[in-house]
Image (tube, helix red, strand yellow):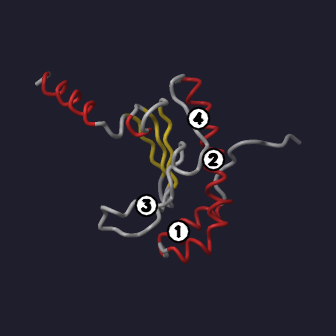
Amino acid sequence: MTDKAGFQGFPSEGIDFLRGLELNNNKEWFLEHKPVYQASLLAPAVELVVALGERLSERFPRITYDTRTNGSGSLMRIYRDVRFSQDKSPYKTAIAMMFSSPGGKKMGHPGFGLQLTTTEVGLVAGVFGFDKAALARYRDLITAND
């Protein structure tokens, strides 16, 4: 029997963790269940980043992936930035990742993304945020064609 390597899916404990986090989005609950998050969501998500990243880079050579789990890599952080949000829940209740070309902010380059929640999987493609100069150029292009 051959031992399969790579992404094998998310175990049910990982999805159960997200369901629990939806109901208990607080630091105490998260810290108590963090080992489940790390083993059943984060570790498989890294395997998925590698599997998808390799396939995407075959077809789109400028697309890269990064297995860092601190938010600097392809995986988005689980911690929410609540500074300017009315929703002060500290944790995201989804696993999300981005694959884009290197250099600068990952959301400012054309790329592909995936988000997994307890009820759906979302796939996205495009540029998700422009810097100020790029936004001005984009707006000029749109209005020039009116």
Residue drawn at (14%, 22%) of the image = 145
- Residue type at tag 1: Arg
Q: Which of the pair 118/70 is nearer the observer? A: 70
> What is the C-alpha distance between the residues marked 1 and 2?
20 Å
**Looking at the picture, how far across and down is residue 22, in whole percent?**
47, 70
Foreground tag (1 vs 2): 2
Q: In which quarter of the image is residue 40?
A: bottom right
**Looking at the image, is mark 3 or mark 1 nearer the viewer?**
3
- SS label for mark 3: loop
Residue 64, relative to residue 6: is it above or below? above
* 85 relative position to 34: left or right: left
The residue that mark 2 highlights is 46
Residue 6: give x, y in percent of width and height: 71, 42
In x, y percent, where is residue 100? 47, 33
Point out the tag, 1 or 2, that comes first from the N-terminus: 1
Is the residue 71 above or below the residue 92 in the image?
above
Question: Mark 4: which amino acid?
Answer: Gly
Q: Marks 3 and 4: which is nearer the front? A: 3
Mark linked to residue 19: 1
| Residue tagged 3 | 80
State which tag comes first along the sequence, 1 or 4: 1
Q: Which amino acid type is marked by label 2?
A: Val
Discs 1/4, front: 4
As drawn, the label of residue 53 is 4
Q: Which of marks 2 and 3 is nearer the N terminus?
A: 2
User: Which mark is first along the chain, 4 or 3?
Assistant: 4
- Cα–Cα span, label 3 and label 1: 17 Å
